[in-house]
Image (cartoon, rainbow, N blue to C red):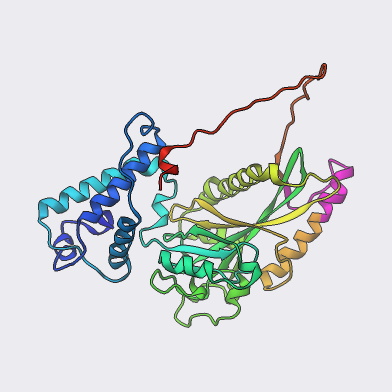
Amino acid sequence: IIVNQVTTAESDQFFRNGKVPVSIVDFANAQCSEYIQHRQHDDLDRQENPLTTAREWTEFLNWFNQLAHEDGQFETTSYPMIQALYTMSKMTLKNIEPYWPLIEVEGWKNLWVVKPSADYCGRGVKVMRNIEDIICNVETATDFRMGRHIVQKYIERPLLIYNTKFDIRQWFLITSVYPLTIWFYKECYLRFSSQPFSLVNLHESIHLTNNAIQRNYSNNRHRDPKLPHENMWHSSKFQDYLNEIGETDKWKTVILPGMKQGIVGAVLASQDEMIDRTNSFELYGADFLLGIDYVPILLEINMGPAMHASTKVTGEICKSGLEDVIKVVLDAKHNPKADTGKFEILYKQELGPRPHHTGDLELLVAGQKIVSDRIIKK
């Protein structure tokens, strides 16, 4: 907030007749510095700092919410103090950037996505701003499918098309778990919201781009007519749009490589938990959001994505996609040179030679995890 709001022209207005104490800026900087030291392991050889109490955090969050969501202002402060706070905050953000990869796109409204872990099609998903509301939403869930929730940071600075939010649905196919074999589909599609983007109004029609959600709402009558009536674009249409705005290279140099990297990284991280079963396959739908820098951010991976013709775009791409799945799992299995349609090998794991076992060796590594005092203290 400090870095985004404080400028020479705005400082007098921002710090006039307010009630929020500037001490919360010192608190925020101190917590960030503590986190940086922890990530750099500088906290291992020094005396433990006093733990921040739950009361201190509650007070901080209450003051923060006034600033971010209730038009609150800082208390009257001298200009030198304003500049000192700005300089300190700017330095903190610079130092924390290596350990906060999405710092440029997460924003400062502290919005979070809360979604049931076992549901799909956007059901039960909410964008929330208050930790008490988030906890209440999770604890009061009655549907057994909503018993466990995922809470993830909302991307507050997404790339917008004609002031409208969108995400990208990208298919990939796994035909072997060990060795891991991933196929990537060369086409994908964009899903648009029916309403203009806003960080004030948290309604699902603005923030959830699933077709299952958006089909329940009429398109905003004031939105740009260049947006698709059915709220979907084929990836080729998106590339045409990038060409029109002078960003032609972003698709091949940033977006496509980023999606591929995100899929491989996520699947490799999950490989140990996957069932290794021969003569089987699974089609997945990965959902990506683009930040203002065009870098794709993996939101989630869906098993068994919808493959019906919900719109004209999906009617075309889903038909060819299903046909190409059959080409991969049947034809390519018996003929390595067979046509695989628009699927291409994204990742094929190379396994080293198995170690030669000699004798009945009983090898065991035993140890105990070192627990920081910071974690076990109440």
Q: Which residues are magenta?
A: 326-344
> Is 72 inside the magenta-drawn segment?
no
Which residue appears farthest toward the top when viewing the image? Answer: 358
Q: Residue 3 in the image: state x and y as whole percent.
A: 26, 53
Q: Is residue 334 magenta?
A: yes
Q: Is residue 264 visible?
A: yes
Q: Nearer the viewer, residue 80 or 34?
A: 34
Disc tally is 0
At x 63%, y 27%, the residue is 366
* Residue 184: percent from left, percent from top: 69, 49
The answer to whether residue 79 is above or below residue 115 is above
On screen, residue 270 above or below 140: above
**x then y, percent, for residue 218:** 54, 82
Front one among 240 and 132: 132
Q: Position of residue 43 (x, y in %)?
A: 36, 34
Residue lying furthest right in this view? 334
Residue 235 is left or right of residue 356, and the answer is left
Q: Quadrant of the N terminus?
A: bottom left
The answer to which image quadrant residue 314 occupies is bottom right
Left or right, residue 334 beside residue 130: right
Which residue occupies the foreground of this view, 163 or 366? 366
Q: Residue at x 82, y 16 (%)?
A: 358
Relative side of 50 to 307, left or right:
left
Is any atom of residue 163 visible in this view? no
Query: What residue lies at 67% left-to-right and 68% top-to-bottom?
Result: 313
- Identified at 16% across, 53% down, the residue is 82
